Amino acid sequence: MARISVCAECFFTDLPFEDRVARIADIGYRYIEFWHPEGTFNGKEIDFSQPKNAAKMTQVAAEKKIAYNDFAFGAWDGSIGGNVTRQADHEGYVRQIQKMLDFAKSIHCSKGIILSGLAQDNLTDQQMNQHIRAAFAQAVQMAEKAGVTLLIEPLNTLVDHPGYFFNKTDEAVRLIREFKSPHLKLLYDIYHMQIMQGNILAFIDKNIDIIGHFHSAGVPGRAELFETEVNYPRIIRALDELGYQGCFGLEYFPRLDHQKSLTRTLDYLS
């Protein structure tokens, strides 16, 4: 079965980040992911007074025998790292990528999520795609040297991320196949793409060679995976049949008690 990772931002949000990791590990999960080193989600917003501490994260990982699978190298709306759709943001974006590569090295993490940022009203789609390609080309070169794989994540604009440019998989897939780098893959978020495109199993079957990670949540509602319109156990079986070796990430906001939710989800996907 695909390895299951848990986004620690979404669970036990009243606890310090390292304590969340410990609680998730005690349930039986071995892979952790998160959003931003610069702050920690408290259940309502990113609290920038609570940045991640690499030394503490490494310590709890060793104690609990878990690994950090991936984290976001910037924010979806450009508030961290800038919008790569805007050429004026590229210098700051490159600095952000280097900071995140350094952080990844410090916690022994080999994957990072990169995002398109927001669409720019004064630019055409062609211009924005050109800007994205130029910025990502620099980021991929840096990632190759660092031994890190970058994951492009499309997001939905109908419910959660209005104005986000890569709101479908098409352009991200085109870009990844054009670059032909083993250090650039797709993060296929099933929740987001079920909202925007559907056709989940057919897309996975066609593109599994360039998918480096998955995210999941119940549709609709972005809560638990069970009792929603997506048949997640069937998707897990498909990944097994295709020989997928990466992680399958849980990035949902639980309606149940967090301990019970993660325990039941682990049973549901097994």
Image (cartoon, rainbow, N blue to C red):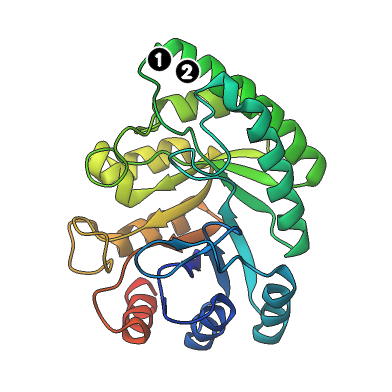
In the rendered structure, the answer to whether residue 163 lies left or right of residue 149 reads left
Q: In the image, residue 223 lies at what x, y percent?
A: 26, 66
Q: Does 1 sit above or below residue 139?
A: below
Q: Nearer the viewer, residue 238 or 184?
A: 184
Q: In the image, residue 188 lies at what x, y percent?
A: 43, 45
Residue picked out by circle 1:
125
Q: In the image, residue 18 lies at what x, y percent?
A: 59, 79
Q: Does 150 sit above or below residue 220?
A: above
Residue type at the position of mark 2: Met
State the separation of the CA atoms marked 2 and 1.
5 Å
> In the rendered image, is residue 198 in sight?
no
User: Residue drawn 54% across and 38% down?
Assistant: 210
Q: In the image, residue 75 lies at what x, y percent?
A: 49, 45
Residue picked out by circle 2:
128
Furthest-right residue in this view? 145
In the rendered structure, the answer to whether residue 264 lies left or right of residue 46 reads left
In the rendered structure, the answer to whether residue 21 lies left or right of residue 162 reads right
- Tag 2's secondary structure? helix
CB-based contact (under 8 Å), mark 2 and mark 1 = yes
User: Residue drawn 37% across and 86% down?
Assistant: 259
User: Residue drawn 34% across and 64% down?
Assistant: 252
> In the rendered image, is residue 151 in sight?
yes
- Tag 1's secondary structure? helix
Q: Nearer the viewer, residue 243 or 170?
A: 170
Q: Residues within 10 Å of mark 1 (few under 14, many from 20)?
A: some
Q: Does 72 sit above or below residue 53?
A: above
Q: Does 131 sit above or below residue 106?
A: above
